[in-house]
C-alpha cells in the first residue's frame, strides 16, 4: 500500500499517503531564525484540511481563483492542496516578479484571495497587489495585518470528509514569462498535472524512500512536475532550501537521491570545486585509476550529492564538457525536455543510453515528430487545456491532430533521441544574408568555465556578437587584481 500510485489525481493520492504513510516525514522546512520544522504526512494533511476549511468558510463561488505568491516552502505545497480541497483553482506567481507583472496576473486571473509567503523581493512586488484583495500570510511572510497561517490552523477545525475533484477539472493556471504584454496563462487539469508525476516516477522507479531538495521555483511547471506531483505519486520526502547562502548545507542535510537542476547551477557547482582545488590538479587525480573513485566520491560528498542515483538537467543546453566532467566524478547528468504547455512531460534521457547534446527520447506515452519546417511537435498526456481567455493563441500552437507546436527546432537520431538545435523565432539573419542559430554558439561559449551566461545576437548586423557574464570567481579575481583583463581576450576568443 505504500508503493508508487498509478492514479494521476493528486488529492486522492494525498489522502492515500495520509492513511498509509501517516507517520513518515513528508516535508522538512528550515525556518528563518528558528529550528527546522518537519511534518509527517498526517501532520501536513491535518494543516491542509484546516486551511481548506477556512477557505471554504470565505463563501467564495466554486472554482474561484486563489493566488499563491511565495518562494519554495513546505506551506507552498500545503496551500496548493488546501486550495484544491476547498474546491478552487490555484494561481501561482513567480517569487520575484515586478509589481506591474504581479498586477497584470492578478487582474487577468481574477484572483479572489492571495496567500503570501517567504519572499526576498516583496518591496518590488507589493504595489502590484490591490489593497482590496484579501490576503493570508504564510509563515515567514513579509506582510503584516493579515490573518496568518498559524492562527488559522490553530482556530479552525479540519475538514472531516475528503473531497475529490474530477480529472478534467481546472486545477491551476501557470503564467509564463511574457516578453511583452500580459504573460500567457497556461491551464492545467488534475489529469495533465498528475499523469506527468506518475510518468516521471515510473521512468525513474521512484519510491517513498527517495528524497528531493526543492529549490527551483514551484511556481514553474518543471519543479511542480517533478517535486510536487512526484511526491503525490510516490510519497517521497521533500526538503526545502533556506537560502542561496546555505544551499550547499541544505543539500548536505537532505542528501537527495534525486536531484534536478539547471545548467547554470551545475556550472556553479563545478566552479565552486575549482575554487577549492585547481582544475589541473583535480584532472591529474581523476586520471589515476586507484584514486579516481575516492576523489570523485569526496567531491560529490562535499556538494551533498553523494547519495544521488539520478541527476537531471533541463531548461537549457548544458555544455558537453560539463557533462563529461561530472561523469568522471561518477555522476551521470541526464538531460530532459519539456514546456509549461505540456507540464514539462515530454522527453528524458535513459541512464546508460544518454547521448551528449541530446535530451533523450519521448516518454512511452508521449509522441514526438519534426515538422517539415524543422519544428519539434509533441503529443503528451500532460498537454495543457489551453491558454486562459485566449482561444486564438491556443489554436496557434496546436495542430489539428493534437500535437503541440513547441517553437523549438530539432532533429532526432536513429534511436529517437532528440536534439534541440534552436528556437524557430530565434534564428536571425545578418546584413550579409547569413542565417545564424544562436543556441549552439551560446552552448560553445558556456563550455568555458570563465563564463556563467551568454547571449548571441546580431540581426541585421554584419557579424553576430555575444554578450557574456563572467564567472563569479573570475569577477572576484579581477577585483583583487590577481587576473589581468588583457589576458582574458585570447582565452575567450578560443571559444
Image (tube, helix red, strand yellow):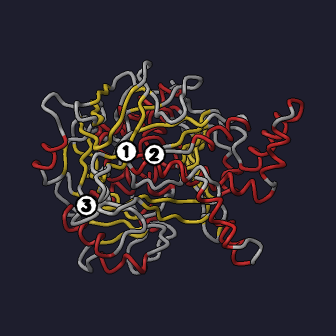
Q: Residues within 10 Å of mark 1 (few under 14, many from 20)?
A: some
Classify 33 as above or below 425: below
Is 125 on the left or on the right of 262, as rendered? left
Q: Position of residue 29 (x, y in %)?
A: 59, 57
Question: Are the residues tagged 2 and 3 within 8 Å (C-beta)?
Answer: no
- Using the rendered image of the protein, determine whether residue 38 is visible from the camera's viewpoint: no
Q: In the rendering, at what x and y percent does residue 42 appear?
A: 51, 44
Q: Residue drawn at (56%, 29%), measured in percent from left and top?
A: 207
- Residue at point 71%, 73% (across, down): 484
Label 1 residue SS: strand
User: Viewer-proximal residue, 115 or 460?
Assistant: 460
Residue identifier under label 1: 422
Left or right of 459 on screen, residue 363 = right
Numbered tag placed on residue 440 in the rendering: 2
Q: Which of marks 1 and 3 is nearer the N terminus?
A: 3
* Badge number at residue 387: none
Q: Are marks 2 and 1 in contact (CB under 8 Å)?
A: yes
Distance between the alpha carbons at the discs numbered 2 and 3: 27 Å
Amino acid at each position: 500500500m505504500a508503493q508508487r500510485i498509478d492514479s494521476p489525481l493528486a488529492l486522492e493520492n494525498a489522502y492515500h499517503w495520509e492513511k498509509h504513510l501517516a507517520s513518515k516525514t513528508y516535508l522538512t522546512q528550515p525556518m528563518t531564525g528558528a529550528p527546522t520544522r518537519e511534518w509527517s504526512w498526517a501532520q501536513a494533511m491535518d494543516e491542509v484540511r484546516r486551511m481548506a476549511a477556512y477557505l471554504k468558510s470565505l463563501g467564495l463561488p466554486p472554482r474561484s481563483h486563489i493566488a499563491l505568491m511565495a518562494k519554495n516552502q513546505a506551506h507552498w505545497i500545503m496551500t496548493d492542496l488546501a486550495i484544491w480541497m476547498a474546491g478552487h483553482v490555484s494561481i501561482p506567481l513567480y517569487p520575484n516578479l515586478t509589481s506591474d507583472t504581479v498586477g497584470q496576473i492578478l487582474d487577468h486571473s481574477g484572483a479572489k484571495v492571495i496567500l503570501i509567503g517567504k519572499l526576498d523581493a516583496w518591496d518590488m512586488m507589493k504595489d502590484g497587489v490591490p489593497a482590496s484583495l484579501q490576503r493570508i500570510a504564510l509563515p515567514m511572510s513579509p506582510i503584516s495585518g493579515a490573518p496568518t497561517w498559524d492562527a488559522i490552523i490553530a482556530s479552525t477545525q479540519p475538514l472531516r470528509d475528503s473531497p475529490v475533484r474530477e480529472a478534467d477539472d481546472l486545477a491551476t493556471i501557470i503564467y509564463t514569462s511574457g516578453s511583452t504584454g500580459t504573460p500567457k496563462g497556461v491551464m492545467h487539469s488534475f489529469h495533465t498535472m498528475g499523469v506527468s508525476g506518475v510518468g516521471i516516477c515510473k521512468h525513474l522507479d521512484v519510491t517513498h524512500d527517495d528524497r528531493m531538495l526543492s529549490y527551483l521555483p514551484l511556481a514553474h511547471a518543471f519543479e511542480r512536475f517533478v517535486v510536487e506531483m512526484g511526491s503525490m505519486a510516490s510519497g517521497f520526502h521533500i526538503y526545502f532550501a533556506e537560502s542561496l547562502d546555505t544551499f550547499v548545507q541544505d543539500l548536505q542535510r537532505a542528501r537527495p537521491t534525486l536531484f534536478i537542476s539547471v545548467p547554470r547551477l551545475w556550472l556553479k557547482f563545478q566552479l565552486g570545486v575549482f575554487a577549492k582545488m585547481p582544475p589541473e590538479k583535480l584532472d591529474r587525480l581523476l586520471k589515476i585509476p586507484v584514486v579516481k573513485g575516492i576523489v570523485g566520491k569526496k567531491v560529490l560528498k562535499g556538494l551533498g550529492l553523494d547519495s544521488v542515483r539520478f541527476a537531471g538537467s533541463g531548461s537549457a543546453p548544458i555544455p558537453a564538457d560539463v557533462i563529461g566532467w561530472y561523469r568522471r566524478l561518477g555522476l551521470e547528468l541526464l538531460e530532459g525536455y519539456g514546456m509549461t504547455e505540456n507540464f514539462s512531460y515530454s522527453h528524458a534521457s535513459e541512464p546508460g543510453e544518454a547521448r551528449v547534446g541530446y535530451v533523450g527520447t519521448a516518454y512511452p506515452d508521449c509522441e514526438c515528430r519534426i515538422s517539415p519546417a524543422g519544428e519539434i511537435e509533441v503529443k503528451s498526456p500532460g498537454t495543457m487545456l489551453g491558454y486562459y481567455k485566449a482561444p486564438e493563441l491556443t489554436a496557434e500552437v496546436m495542430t489539428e491532430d493534437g500535437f503541440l507546436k513547441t517553437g523549438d527546432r530539432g532533429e532526432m537520431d536513429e534511436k529517437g533521441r532528440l536534439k534541440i538545435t534552436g528556437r524557430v523565432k530565434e534564428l536571425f539573419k545578418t546584413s550579409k544574408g547569413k542565417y545564424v542559430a544562436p543556441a549552439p554558439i551560446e552552448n560553445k561559449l558556456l563550455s568555458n568555465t570563465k563564463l556563467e551566461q551568454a547571449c548571441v545576437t546580431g540581426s541585421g548586423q554584419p557579424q553576430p556578437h555575444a554578450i557574456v557574464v563572467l564567472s563569479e570567481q573570475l569577477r572576484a579575481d579581477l577585483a583583487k587584481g590577481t587576473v589581468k583583463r588583457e589576458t582574458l581576450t585570447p582565452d575567450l576568443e578560443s571559444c
